[in-house]
Amino acid sequence: MTDALELVDEWGPEKVVVVSHRRTGMKGTLVIDNTARGMGKGGTRLSPAVTVTEVARLARTMTWKWAAVDLFYGGAKAGIAADPAAPDKEAILRAFARALHNEVPREYVFGLDMGLTEDDAAVIQDELGDRGAAVGTPAHLGGIAYDRLGVTGFGVAEAADAGAELVGHPLSGSRVAIQGFGAVGRAAAERLVELGAVIVAVSTASGAVHNPAGLDVGELRQARDEFGDAFVTQLSATPLSPGQELFVDCEVLVPAAVQDVIDRDSAQAIKAGLVVEGANLPTSPGAQAVLAERGITVVPDFVANAGGVIAAAFAMDARYSGFRPGTDEVFATVSDKLRGNTRTALDKAKVSGGTPHEAGRRLAEERVRAAMRSKGRLGEGPA
Ligand SMILES: NC(=O)C1=CN([C@@H]2O[C@H](COP(=O)(O)OP(=O)(O)OC[C@H]3O[C@@H](n4cnc5c(N)ncnc54)[C@H](OP(=O)(O)O)[C@@H]3O)[C@@H](O)[C@H]2O)C=CC1
Ligand SMILES: O=C(O)CCC(=O)C(=O)O
């Protein structure tokens, strides 16, 4: 078990809060990683096994993501150790929000991540009596419902399109395997198909399916609406053992579920030529090195899945002003930024000879360090 103090390095975290509430059984954490470029912002994960270390790693990813996309927020993430299907979820959410009333909204604003929905964000706002407490709320509350709109998944597909062009294998006609069919995986699948790709494998926590000739994304969506999370077990496509969707024959792989699914060993078995990280932290640094050695290009999480933060940034501005941008503007910004940032990360990696993670991270680190220096946080005095 990691002691929370062992998490601290030169970047952060600046603040780790652990909260609990006996009656509801709520247990959760907020990690504010680095605020040199702005207040801590990142989504809120609801998952039975979430740990402080996991949330800290996600908060650090947010630090790089905001810097890589060049928007002025800092890295943060919150996590609640609970089952998204728990009957007492609302009471748990309310207890979590109440417990963080000192931090929210001045130091942290809730947002969406695995297990948290638009309506959950609305409950949090209700509990704190402040429409600034959460973003990702439904449109009828003035929010930008970025999960329902599929903004992050859309951006992942745009990044895949730009990445495919750079590796010289156009997305149109490419076969794609997707791990996870939630807010990110589903929306990525829909946009990838619009861009001409063929989805050959998808999975959820309940299982995976494969059809080399292509799966019908409309049917997948319908099955999900009808059967819920276990919908993959109801499809006629060939079932795969869980996790095998990562290793099917395809040109593009989109891990869009949980972290740490591809390590140094399993990276040897990836068949795709392009990996686009929809999930946060799906590959280990060892896996990234192996994939680079094998000539497999990876678009890093903090570049590819930044659609959510772009939508969150619009929503942060809209919280009190009442002025909400049109969804077309949000999608156009995501497309523009993520295509450009994908090209930058892959080009820089080519020039430096490192992995795209290393190249993208170097750029993000430079931006964070410059902000820390200007604010006198490095002990060197302002620049
Ligand atoms: N939502 C957002 O805006 C953003 C999300 N992300 C990242 O994207 C990832 C997915 O988030 P999101 O789509 O919002 O989450 P959701 O909760 O909406 O969906 C998660 C999906 O992953 C599936 N899943 C969970 N565990 C596994 C597993 N071991 N193997 C295969 N599938 C699995 C779930 O299946 P089941 O339904 O059966 O549980 C579900 O289909 C996370 O890493 C998140 O941090 C990154 C940027 C923004
Ligand atoms: O900041 C948010 O509210 C959503 C984006 C997010 O959590 C992420 O990119 O992982």
Image (cartoon, helix red, strand yellow):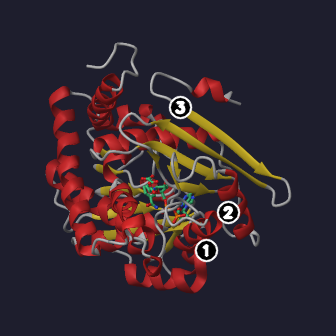
Residue in front for this viewpoint, 213 or 290: 290
Can residue 268 be seen here? The reply is no
Lower sequence index among marks 3 and 1: 3
The vertical placement of 157 against 360, above or below, is below
The vertical placement of 9 against 158, above or below, is above
The vertical placement of 316 against 216, above or below, is above
Q: Which mark is on residue 49?
A: none
- Identify the secondary structure beneath mark 3: loop
Q: Which residue is mark 2?
A: 93
**Where is residue 194 drawn, in percent x and y?**
24, 75
The image quadrant of residue 254 is bottom left
Q: Is mark 1 within 8 Å of ligand 1?
A: yes
Q: Which residue is mark 1?
A: 230
Q: Which residue is mark 3?
A: 14
Q: Quadrant of the C terminus?
A: top left
Type of amino acid at the residue the image marks with label 2: Leu
Instruction: Answer few, some or many: residues within 10 Å of disc 2's Cα (few below 14, many 20 plus, some between 14 and 19).
Output: many
Q: Quadrant of the N terminus?
A: top right
Direction from residue 317 to residue 94 in the image, left or right: right
Residue in front for this viewpoint, 60 or 14: 14
Residue at image position (21%, 68%) is 173
**Where is residue 242 drawn, in percent x and y?**
57, 59
Instruction: Answer few, some or many: residues within 10 Å of disc 1's Cα (few below 14, many 20 plus, some between 14 and 19).
Output: some
Residue at image position (30%, 25%) is 374
Residue at image position (37%, 55%) is 309
Residue at image position (57%, 66%) is 125
- Identify the secondary structure beneath mark 2: helix
